[in-house]
Structures are given as C-alpha cells and as structure tokens.
Image (tube, rainbow, N blue to C red):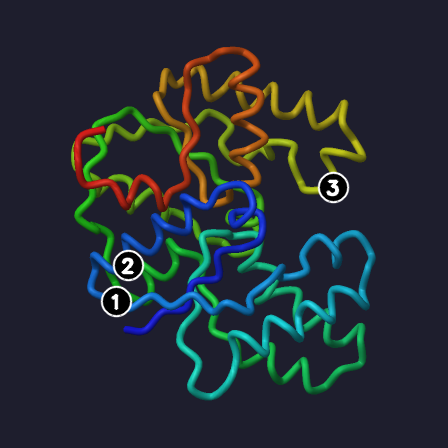
Amino acid sequence: MRVALFVACFNDALFPGTGRAVTRLLERLGHQVVFPAGQSCCGQVHWTSGYQREAADLARGFAAVFGGDDAPVVVTPSASCAATVRRDYPRIARAAGDAGLARDAEGLRVHELSEFLVDVLGVTDVGARFPHRVTYHPTCHALRALEVGDRPRRLLRAVRDLELVELPEAGECCGFGGAFAMKNADVSVAMVADKVRHVRATAADVVCAVDNSCLAHIGGALTRLRAGVRTMHLAEILAETETV
C-alpha cells in the first residue's frame, strides 16, 4: 500500500525520530511511504486559539497536499492532528463559509498510527521487540476525540519481551493541552505532577503515548525530578527489533 506520512509540525520541529520510526515500521510491513514536501501545520493551535481565518488557510493547504481522487491514505503519529482533520475541518469549513473546503475535508483519509495498523492493516503483532517495562498514557485527543480505545495497548501487548503495566488514573489529562499549559501554568503543573506520580508508581522504564506533545510535558516533569523514566512515542517502540 502507498502511504502518505503527515509527520505533524510539532514532531517535525522537536521529535523528528518519530517520523523516521513510522517510516521504518511501515516499510518493514511492506508498504511504500511517501512524504509530501508541501505539508505544513494542520491548524489545530490556530483553530483552538480563535484564529479561524488562519486555521481555514491551513486546512485548505492540507487538503491540497493530501487530498484528491488518487491520494494515498494518510497516516500520522499524532492523535491530536488526526482529530483536528477529521473532527474540526468540517467545523472550520462551516465557520469560513467554504463549501469547497467542506467537500475536500470529507474526502480526506487520515488515520492515527494505531488505528491504521489495527483497523486498516488488521495487524497487532508488527514484529517488534522491546525488553522493557512500559506504561501507556492515553492522551486526551486519542481517548476522547478519536476514541482509539485499546488499539495502542493491543499493539504493545504483542511486542516481544515488553512488560506492559497499567497506569493508575490513566484517563486523567497530563495538563498540557497546547496553549492551556501556557495560559494556566499553575493548573498545568499540578496536573502533570499527578500524572508523574502515577507514572512513577508503575516502576516503568518507559512511558509511552501516541502524542509527543503530551510526552514532552510529562518528560519535562520526569527530567526535573530525575525520575529515570524515559518517554517514547508508540511508533518508536513498534519500530524496535533489536535489544536496546
């Protein structure tokens, strides 16, 4: 299958290894991965911050790059960006009064990575090996907007030599929320302190998620505490095949 990788701007700027991991993983599974050079931000931050015109411009740009009758399926290692395209683009189009954008948005085929693997490819065992104790944090967009459910856990359970431990109060927000963390810093810090306390209670070596934005927030708090717990995107774990 031909797959277009939407890496997401946060990953492109701060976590480029995640995009490389997605590529290694999908190519190992026998698929062709292409990276459209014209891709940019999906517009999530603009839309949620009230910049509707700018969000519409970015949505049009996304549709131009990833849309069309012969466009490949789009995979992204970002639940929040996938949710923006699938849930918010129709709203952005209505707010802009742009019927063309509404039609283009309806035709986009965008999947978060775990959805693509489990629902589209029908696989849970991707041939990975990761001999570490791992806990999984379900990010808010993955849990509530996309409703990916147990797909990431099913993938993790199939990884050879990986010990998956449940995260207490897993459904609680980490406190990032994009601009929320900057506008409500005290609340955000209190929320991530709770999250980190639960992560440490698992005695995990690694905390995993499907959004690097949340992992950056959690990882910053873990680093400041010198907790000795790494953060890794799901794609990076699934791409591993050797002892690490």
In percent of width and height, residue 203 lies at 37, 15
Q: Nearer the viewer, mark 3 or mark 1?
A: 1
Label annotation for residue 179: 3
Helix, strand or loop under label 3: helix
Q: Amino acid at mark 1?
A: His
In this rendering, the answer to whether 110 lies above or below 152 is below
Helix, strand or loop under label 1: loop
* Quadrant in the rendering for residue 206: top left
Q: Residue at x 68, y 81 (%)?
A: 101
Mark 2 neighbour density, 10 Å: few (under 14) some (14–19) many (20 or more): many
In this rendering, the answer to whether 173 lies above or below 103 is above
- Marks 1 and 2 sit apart, C-alpha to C-alpha, by 6 Å
Query: In the rendered structure, are the residues bearing label 3 and label 1 in contact, judged by CB atoms less than 8 Å apart?
Result: no
Q: Residue at x 43, y 49 (%)?
A: 149
Mark 1 neighbour density, 10 Å: few (under 14) some (14–19) many (20 or more): some
* Quadrant in the rendering for residue 236: top left
Q: In front here: 170 or 71?
A: 71
Query: In the rendered structure, are the residues bearing label 1 and label 2 in contact, judged by CB atoms less than 8 Å apart?
Result: yes
The earlier-in-sequence mark between 3 and 1 is: 1
In percent of width and height, residue 63 lies at 59, 76
Q: In front here: 46 or 135?
A: 46
Q: Amino acid at mark 2?
A: Leu
Q: Residue at x 41, y 46 (%)?
A: 18
- Marks 3 and 2 sit apart, C-alpha to C-alpha, by 32 Å
Q: Amino acid at mark 3?
A: Ala
Q: Residue at x 33, y 56 (%)?
A: 23
Label annotation for residue 11: none
Horizontal side, residue 85 vs residue 20: left or right:
right
According to the image, label 1 marks what residue? 31
